[in-house]
Amino acid sequence: MSYTDYIWDLGGTLLDNYQTSALAFQHVLRADFGVDVGFEAIYDALRVSTEFAVDKFAADLPEFIQLYKTREVADLRSPILFPGAIAVLDAIVKQGHRNFMISHRDDHVIEILKAANISQYFTEVVTASNGFDRKPSPQSIQYLLDKYQLKQAVMIGDRNIDMLAGEAAHIDTIYFNAVDDQTKVTHKITCLTDILSL
């Protein structure tokens, strides 16, 4: 491993949450608003961002976001990690390195990490409650770089905004399951355990 500090995105990177989130999104559209949108369309939109999906399918639906978030939180009580997630996090810590997380979610993300049995692997988790601008802003990464004096850090994520945030913070990036081949990245991987050989 050539890095000492790993800054992770959660959803779509460590946590395989898109299916759960898309089902919750679809359920709320149908059950609460009588709107029928296909699962694949919602899934693809959520891969871009939650805001994108809401703007596309529920922009004019009052209280949709609150109902969706409530349903999603309930459904994420049993989080599913991508294969290799625990092995990679554990190997990083055993080698004396550190893991950090940046999430757009509120402090509920801490409960998700605990439910997934991975909270112990993180030195710090930055959430929406910290008040930083959302990615692709590099503010949350810069906060970690400054606070912990990170010298060999890398940003790991599954979306363009994760890569743009890392690039803006002048650190290397690892694009997991890339859906956008146009984004400038340091590494592309399709399996989390590939990180151990970088």
Image (tube, rainbow, N blue to C red):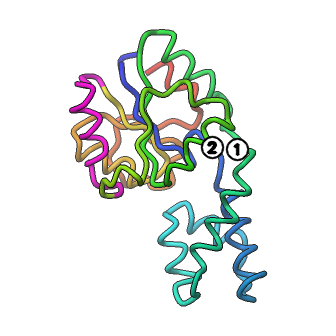
Q: Quadrant of residue 54?
A: bottom right
Read off the residue under disc 2. Answer: 112
Image height check: is 130 above or below 43? Answer: above
Measured as percent of width and height from the top left, residue 138 is found at: 27, 48
Badge 1 element? loop
Tag 2: amino acid: Ile
Q: Residue at x 53, y 24 (%)?
A: 121
The residue at the point 46 percent across, 9 percent down is: 95
Specify the amino acid type for callout 1: Pro
Disc marking residue 23: none
Residue in view at x 70 percent, y 80 percent: 29
- Give yes or no for contact between labels 1 and 2 (Cβ–Cβ under 8 Å): yes
Q: Residues within 10 Å of mark 1 (few under 14, many from 20)?
A: some
Image quadrant in which you'd find residue 6: top left
Q: Which residue is mark 1?
A: 79
CA distance for labels 1 and 2: 7 Å
Name the residue at 78% across, 81% down. Answer: 31
Q: x%, y% of residue 46?
A: 57, 64
* Residue 92 among those drawn in magenta: no
Name the element at disc 2.
Answer: helix
The residue nearer to you, when weighing 122 against 56, is 122
Q: Closer to the camera: disc 1 or disc 2? A: 2
Q: Magenta part of the protein: which range?
A: 134-152
Q: Quadrant of the C terminus?
A: top left
Query: Quarter of the image containing the N terminus?
Result: top left
